[in-house]
Image: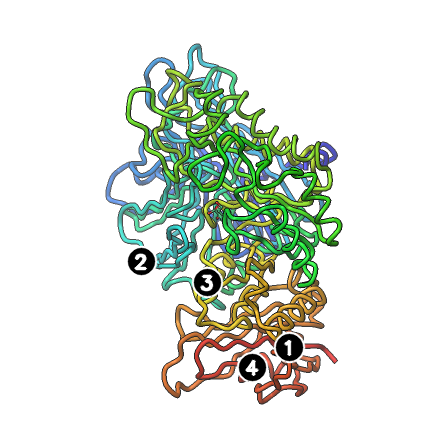
Amino acid sequence: MKHLLSLALIVFVAFSAHAAEVGRQFIRIATEATDLILSTAPNGRLYQVYLGPKLLHEEDFGHFSPYTRRGSDSSAATRGWEAYMTAGMEDYFEPALQVTHADGNMSSLLKYASSQTNQIDENVTETIVTLKDDAYPLEVKLHYVAYARENIIKTWSEIVHQEKKPVLLHRYASGIIYFERPSYYLTEFSGDWAQEMQMNHQQLQFGKKMIDTKLGSRAAMHAYPFFELGFGQPAEESRGEVVMGTIGWTGNYRFTFEVDNLKNLRVLAGINPFASTYELQPGEVFTTPEFIFTRSDEGKGQASRNFHDWARNYQLKDGNGDRLTLLNNWENTAFTFDEKILGELMKEAKHLGVDMFLLDDGWFGNKYPRNNDRAGLGDWEAMESKLPNGVPGLVRLAKEAGVKFGIWIEPEMVNPKSELMEKHPDWAIRLPNRETYYYRNQLVLDLSNPEVQDHVFGVVDKLMTENPEIAYFKWDCNSPITNVYSPYLKEKQNQLYVNHVRGVYNVFKRVKEKYPDLPMMLCSGGGARCDYEALKYFTEFWCSDNTDPVERLFIQWGFSQFFPTKAMCAHVTSWNKNTSIKFRVDVAMMCKLGFDIGLKELSDDELAYCQQAVSNYNRLKPVILEGDFFRLVSPYETNHTAVMHVSKAKDKALVYAYDIYPRFQEKTFAVRLQGLDPERMYKVEEINLMPGAKSRFAQNGQVFSGDYLMKVGLYALTPQTLQSRILEVTAQ
Ligand code: GLA
């Protein structure tokens, strides 16, 4: 990106339109489907004048007034949607920036100074707008990166000043966008451990709705960093205007949705300023996280596909690369294993046909062995009693078995019962003068401290240096920040939440720089870390410890709103034994497939089924990992669900259909497919059948036009409980 930037052609795009005001400038941030237009005003300030479908004629821009037109107060005549709304002036609603200057003055007023656009390549454009306070040496640069084809815009700000003493930043949003529509509906994602990404919607009325977290490290445990907006009605799947957004911050974040007296909506996204008034030194640049959003005129489905394409092309680590199938041991053995048991599991992994064996928690600690979650965290030496030949012994065994080897770590944490805690009691975030509260018997290490960053980086680096054949890490983070006090920051505690996350990124960056090709799973007691900044450094994430396939259908429905399914790890386990192995595999198969189950628990037929599914998965990876994803039937609205992947060339598709708990003799309807070529003919065949079973799908083997499949559909659902079928759709 930096490299591309330096090559970039610098083009100035701010231009004067045929506007009444002489010298009025417009800044157009455009994708193929969307325009975000900013405009200067005679008062020298910068306003958002438009965010909506792409406009055809720049000549029309002059019709936009920079000010909102209604309102009973006299200042309303010049009140507008400031591109980076400041506190202390004539707008009384939520500001993006609130500063106490060195002299104690609490107002800021930003005037437009300049703007430039760097054409990074034929698809990506970066616009940088500089705003300056006219009474103080304080400057804000607004960055907007527009991805034309993916219809994604990301924005962030940089705040810097040259005042004589530090200034206090009370609010420092990444960005703010405004809407003027008859009504606004918000879809939000909330949850808890094992209940990730539950979707709910509500109409936004006058006042503020906030979605935020104060959990610090396991940040998204209760509120996930995503939102969807529908206008006039809740956001719909396949029609209507929808805006979807997220923030790339692996810590406390906040979205504010405020409907004001003019019935306009503003949306602010940024770091949560809670307990985080930031003391900005003269010359220090405060860079806010990326606020990433998309807009679609064809509902959430298209907006999701915008995110999926953008993530694969630009954001996710190795976004367009392959993914490894695996056998994990956590649900199977928990902490109870030794080298011999693991050696057997590696052979089972090979027999199953997956690429890798992933060793989970419980392999380390000697003075304080990690035989449960109460001890050993922080002591990353193999436990001699379980693993006499250490990690090198396991790497050897995996090689002998013919599978790759991956390993679990949780390097940002410490158990009080550990050698690390004995050696470095001041490395843990912990109050010096109060009783300590432990979440999962552990504490969060203080990543604002550079020495601690070295330690955390060292955990990966040492394992990799000693075992260069380690092929994968599962990086966990089970505790929120508790007992909020950094021994390192001393009297600057208000920097902790921000500096801690920056410290985490320093470590992630070092790991990626040194091991650019190492695939890594981001995990946080399930799916509590799932933001697009962390995912620059991780190839995938663990969606939930809840692997009950019925629950997973909802969780995956939720995460697929924002993530390509290749980033979503889904494992077949023994949660919900009322469901068949087939049902469990078919649910995991739409994401990044893995297993975490004792193969000895399975009957011969079940094992053969799993082997066949793995081989189908490998054969169909180009569709599953790279295809377009369509949500067809919602589990929130029916007793069934169906989704599909379609290859970019539209020559192959997979339909996944699930009956959850239908009513007695419930009438089922045909599932209309999407994304196919209406002119092509497609053969539909059921795959993933139990050994010896014949397909009961009545239309099996028939050939249809894409037009028919999309307008009439397939009878892929049934009134039976907990049934699933996967249909392979192949262009003839
Ligand atoms: C977390 C993860 C699990 C597992 C355990 C190990 O809960 O989400 O998958 O790794 O930790 O302690």
Question: How far across and down, in percent of the image, does residue 314 sit?
Answer: 64, 46
Tell me which label, 4 or 2, sits earlier in the chain. Answer: 2
Residue lying at 29% horizontally and 45% vertically, measured from the top left:
208
Eyeballing the image, is 613 above or below 670? above
Residue 393 in the image: x percent, y percent? 69, 41
At 37% from the left and 47% from the top, the residue drawn is 222
Q: Who comes first in sequence, dot 1 or dot 3?
A: 3
Distance from label 1 to label 4 (Cα)? 23 Å
State yes or no: Cβ of the residue under disc 4 lies below 8 Å from any atom of ligand 1: no
Residue 94 location, x and y as percent? 33, 38
Q: Which residue is mark 4?
A: 711
Q: What residue type is disc 4 on? A: Lys
- Quadrant showing the C terminus: bottom right
Q: Residues within 10 Å of mark 4 (few under 14, many from 20)?
A: some
Spatial CA distance of label 2 from label 1 is 42 Å
Q: Mark 1 vs ligand 1: CB under 8 Å?
A: no
Task: Label 2, secondary structure: give it.
Answer: strand
Picture quadrant of residue 164: top left
Of the pair 350 and 184, the residue shown nearer to us: 350
Q: Is residue 210 left or right of residue 362?
A: left
Q: Is residue 16 visible?
A: no
- Frontmost of labels 4 and 3 is 3
Identity, as a three-letter code, of the amino acid under mark 2 = Gln
The structure residue drawn at horizontal position 43% and vertical position 74%, both measured from the top left corner, is 660
- Viewer-side label of 2, 3: 3
Residue closer to the observer: 291 or 124 = 291
Q: CA distance from mark 1 to mark 3?
A: 24 Å
Specify the label residue 203 is tagged with: 2
Task: Please report the residue visible at 62 percent of the width from the left and 33 percent of the height from the top.
Answer: 509
Above or below 255: residue 655 = below
The residue singled out by tag 1 in the image is 687
- Crowdedness near tag 1: few (<14), some (14–19) or many (≥20) residues, C-alpha within 10 Å: some
